[in-house]
Amino acid sequence: MISETMENAVNEQINKEMYSAYLYLSMSSYFESINLKGFANWMYVQYQEEVEHAMKFYEHLKNRGGKLKLFAINEPPSEWKSPLDVFQATLKHEQFITKSINELVDIAESEKDRAAYNMLQWFIDEQVEEEANDEEIIAQLEMVEESRNGLLMLDRELAKRGAAAD
Ligand code: FEO
């Protein structure tokens, strides 16, 4: 049985993951609006992954006799200044999520909740990967700067990200 403190924290995390999904779907639509279909695809896959993250937390809650509480999802922004601006915002958001996952680990440790601790290890690894992906794309965007050719090449690269990729 999950503790009330962990149940609340997991419910809050589900809300953060669903907000992440909203944010990335909004970013995907922004990229569609500026005709960068590859970037839009990358963000759409990211949106799908965030829903999966929320569901992983829900499965954990369900399997441990916890009760789901769905909170209202905040409205994400819908406009950005540039692709670089989008990815800087993405990295900042993922750093916030990493902090939140770390706080969940702290609760699991203080409560000696080994089941939650185990489940959270997957998220620790996932956050390392997500931040690294964002940093890589930021570095590439900084390299191409205002070059339209460079941006189109990167767009073609990001178009390859498939739904099954992490
Ligand atoms: Fe669910 Fe992007 O972390």
Image (cartoon, helix red, strand yellow):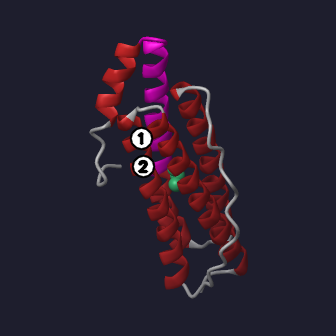
Q: Quadrant of residue 12?
A: bottom right
Q: Position of residue 97 (x, y in %)?
A: 61, 50
Does label 2 point to a residue whose CB lies under 8 Å from ligand 1? no
Residue sitting at x 53%, y 55%: 21
Label 2: how many Cα within 10 Å (few below 14, some 14–19, many 20+)? many
Residue closer to the observer: 28 or 52: 28
- Dominant SS type (magenta): helix
Disc 2 residue type (three-letter): Tyr
**Does the magenta portion include 122?**
no
Residue sitting at x 34%, y 14%: 149
Q: Position of residue 77 (x, y in %)?
A: 66, 44
Q: Position of residue 162 (x, y in %)?
A: 28, 48
- For the N terminus, which image quadrant? bottom right
Q: Position of residue 101 (x, y in %)?
A: 60, 55
SS assignment at label 1: helix
**Does the magenta portion include 131?**
yes
Disc 1 residue type (three-letter): Ala
Residue closer to the observer: 63 or 72: 72
Span highlighted in magenta in the image:
125-147
Residue closer to the observer: 72 or 92: 72
SS assignment at label 2: helix
Give left or right: position of 95 versus 150.
Answer: right
Does label 1 point to a residue whose CB lies under 8 Å from ligand 1? no
Residue closer to the observer: 137 or 85: 85
Q: CB of mark 1 within 8 Å of CB of mark 2?
A: yes
Q: Is residue 98 above or below residue 105?
A: above
Residue named by callout 2:
44
Measured Cα–Cα span from mark 1 to mark 2 = 6 Å
Residue named by callout 1:
40
Label 1: how many Cα within 10 Å (few below 14, some 14–19, many 20+)? many
